[in-house]
């Protein structure tokens, strides 16, 4: 695992540094409007790359949301790795959401596959088939999860900190997507959603699914 804890993602520091430096230069040159614009962009960059701590639910059997955002789909779809029908939950992240992604449940990373593609709006159904994406498979005994990071209309960089063979805990950071995107989670057959379309999620904290009763 390549990621260590920080309140800001290291990947964002170059952006923040460049914007802050430009703002300082504009201010020293007394270019007020450009300095103001630079300050706004710097604040937005800091907001985008923030990485707050999260506390998972007490119940260890409850899976958690892998991303901050809005649930745009709960339904049936073909798992892109196993090719079997599964329940999928899709979460859309806008540019104001935290973009750090977290493991929905504990498990070992048994497969990571990056697929180049297009950059349609991530809220569209075809984004799961056509857009740039990275698929991650988590296995815990006989139970498996498929988590797919999908780049969006603006996003141009998927970052995955996890490596094949890593053992992730529930809610552990495993990657991020820059500038607007989506994360799909394909549930094991013995799990069912406990969230509905239109609801907001907090990565690593909002209950996403629980064992079927």
Image (cartoon, rainbow, N blue to C red):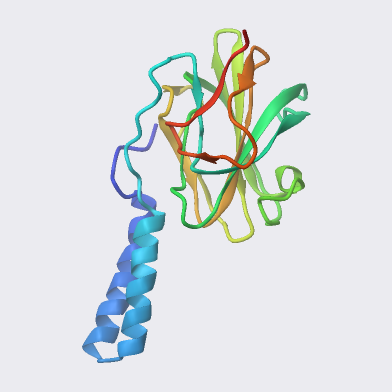
Counting from the top left corner in percent of width and height, residue 94 is at 54, 54
Counting from the top left corner in percent of width and height, residue 50 is at 35, 50
* Image point (64%, 59%), residue name: 153
The front one of 134 and 127 is: 127
Q: Residue furthest bottom?
A: 30
Counting from the top left corner in percent of width and height, residue 164 is at 51, 26
Image quarter of residue 77: top right
Q: Is residue 151 left or right of residue 86?
A: left
Counting from the top left corner in percent of width and height, residue 29 is at 25, 91
Q: Is residue 30 left or right of residue 87?
A: left
Q: Is residue 15 visible?
A: no
Looking at the image, residue 33 lies above or below residue 213: below
Count of numbered badges drawn on the protein: 0
Q: Quadrant of the N terminus?
A: top left
* Image point (42%, 31%), residue name: 205
Q: Quadrant of the C terminus?
A: top right
Q: Is residue 110 left or right of residue 57?
A: right
* Image point (70%, 25%), residue name: 87
């Amino acid at each position: 695992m390549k990621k260590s804890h920080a309140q800001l993602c290291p990947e964002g520091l170059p952006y923040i540094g460049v914007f802050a430096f430009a703002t300082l230069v504009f201010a020293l040159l007394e270019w007020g409007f450009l300095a103001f614009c630079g300050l706004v962009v710097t604040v937005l960059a800091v907001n985008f790359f923030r990485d707050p701590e999260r506390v998972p639910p007490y119940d260890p059997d409850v899976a958690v949301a892998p991303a901050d955002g809005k649930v745009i789909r709960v339904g049936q779809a073909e798992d892109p790795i196993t090719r079997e029908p599964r329940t999928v939950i899709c979460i859309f992240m806008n540019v104001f959401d935290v973009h750090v992604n977290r493991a929905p449940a504990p498990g070992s990373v048994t497969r990571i596959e990056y697929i180049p593609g297009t950059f349609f709006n991530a809220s569209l159904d075809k984004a799961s088939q056509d857009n740039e994406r990275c698929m991650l498979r988590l296995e815990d005994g006989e139970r498996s999860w498929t988590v797919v990071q999908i780049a969006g209309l603006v996003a141009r960089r998927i970052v995955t900190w996890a490596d094949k063979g890593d053992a992730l805990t529930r809610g552990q950071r495993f990657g991020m997507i820059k500038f607007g995107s989506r994360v799909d989670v394909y549930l094991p057959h013995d799990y069912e959603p406990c969230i509905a379309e239109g609801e907001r999620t907090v990565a690593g904290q909002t209950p996403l699914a629980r064992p079927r009763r």
